[in-house]
Amino acid sequence: MSRIDAVNRRYDASASLVRSGVKVVRVGDPAGARFDAAVHRLLPLVMEERGAYLDDLVGAARMLRWRCITQPQPLEFNPSLPQLAAAVTKYAARLHRAINDQGLLDELVAAADLVVAGDPVVGAALLRSLEEAGVDSSVVVAASTSAAAGLQSWLNDWGVLVLTGVELQRDEPKREQAYVVGPPRFYRPRMVTAPVTSAVSWLLPAWVRDRNMPQSAIGAYAEGAIRIAARLFTEGDMTEPESRLPDELEEANEYLPQPVWGSRQDSAREPTTEEVEAHRVLLSGNLAMWLDDGERIRSLDPEQPPEERVTYTDIPAVRVGTYLLLRQGETEHSALYHAAVARLARGGAIAQTQQAWKYRLAERIGRAGYREVVKQLQEAGVKAADRARAWTDPNLIRPQSDQDFARLLQWLDIPVQPTFSDATLLRKAHHQVSNQVRERLETAASRADLSELEAKGHLILDAEAEGFRGIIATRVLAISPFTEIVPRYDARVPFEDRGGQWLE
């Protein structure tokens, strides 16, 4: 299919949705509604208590509820559902007599047991819909990669195509009907504003009340913006507990598994030259790292063609879902730096000139303070003066701008040569080593099963390069909204952290 044909199909599909709207099928689920009501009672308690001792119970409960919404396959293909129900029971038992409302814990456990007493009802409704529309003309759309893998394990025998929303937009399969699992807000606006299929139906438990269509950020201001009407349908037992929250108090984000970050420490002081401010990043595989304010970090994009998957991502562009390439036990920056120094005939002497100007810069920051140093550098004409603290990092070779570097050296009362040329030579060697490592990582990525990476969220890559074996590709699960002051040598080094165990 040519690109023009694909665009025409999009226009036809969009016109069809404008005419007929989309279907939102609410499936009665009394067991899930009871558990959802118990979770709603639990969340205010967390706000009141503000104690980390509740984190595991809340995490397991929210993840069980999330899986009920996004992975409605039968229990035979859904082992995580009973596992999560058992986790709710375990963590509730640990809190026995720790909170006053014992009835809430008992209800939470009873409701979790009821959820896994039978197969999810939304799955049965999905299968009936697929049989009515025809498997060959339908596609099932899942809320995440792991959800797609779970649904595919069940629907594979029927020959059903299962994709994530991103994959649907990318692959553009020739299907007429999309069955989307979960509420509309879990998906990007393009699902309805630039549809791939001419018919779209959402299926969700009736107790999920948020049924608003996803809206483009500029849709409210655009003249002639596409507006899709939703036709509501219900099926099954719509019985719900009396403790149900009013509709207006619910938010779509309330159903998403959320990390618990606590509050920032040491907010009043500035980091020393041996410290950095960094965001805590939760990673797949029960890992975490401290992400500093550096310029970029090595990453992997499984959706790119071979030889173009390994790249660098600017630090501000790192998002939930980004795959980072990390070296366990040491930063890649450190390994690359030492490899670049070893590559040069005058490596030892160059390392000394590097150490000299960085030491003097760190000394001035320590004596005058970071803000004063930035002010003086700006007056000296250094445009990236706010990077002064980052330049003291032994592994950051030099400022990007030649002019900034020369003016920095002059401000430090250091002769521009040979320090300038030494650093430039080292940077060139660093780029050469980095490119060699990238090529080996590309080779490793081409040999790896990237479908396993997308399903599990992490994968070990063997780059077969000295100092770079055992690099892990891991998906970003969450990024803390605030920074902490940490030792510089801890930044970008992955460490074990189970804070992301309840996140997709």
Image: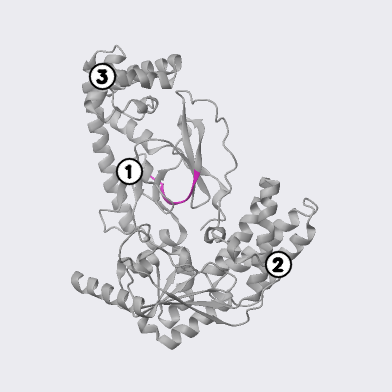
Decide if residue 193 is on the left or right side of residue 232.
left
Q: Position of residue 361 (x, y in %)?
A: 37, 18
The amino acid type, in three-letter code, at marker 2 is Ser
Residue 101's quadrant in the figure? bottom right
Q: How many marks?
A: 3
Q: Which residue is mark 2?
A: 243
Magenta-drawn segment:
469-480
Q: Observer-nearest residue: 337 or 222?
A: 222
The residue indicated by pointer 3 is: 407
Provide the secondary structure element on which disc 3 rests: helix
Label 3 neighbour load within 10 Å: few <14, some 14-19, many 20+: some
Q: Are marks 1 and 2 in contact (CB under 8 Å)?
A: no
Q: Which one is closest to the eye, mark 1 or mark 3?
A: 3
Q: Is residue 149 left or right of residue 99?
A: left
Q: Nearer the viewer, mark 2 or mark 3?
A: 2
Q: Can residue 385 be seen from the camera position used here? A: yes
Distance between mark 2 and mark 3 Cα atoms:
67 Å
Left or right of 64 in this view: 167: left
Which SS type dominates the magenta stretch? strand
In terms of secondary structure, where does tag 1 sit?
A: loop
Query: Is residue 472 on the magenta stretch?
Result: yes
The answer to whether residue 391 is seen in the rendering is no
Circle 2 — which element?
loop
Residue that numbered label 1 is attached to: 465
Q: Earlier in the sequence, mark 1 or mark 2?
A: 2
Mark 2 touching mark 3, by CB under 8 A?
Answer: no
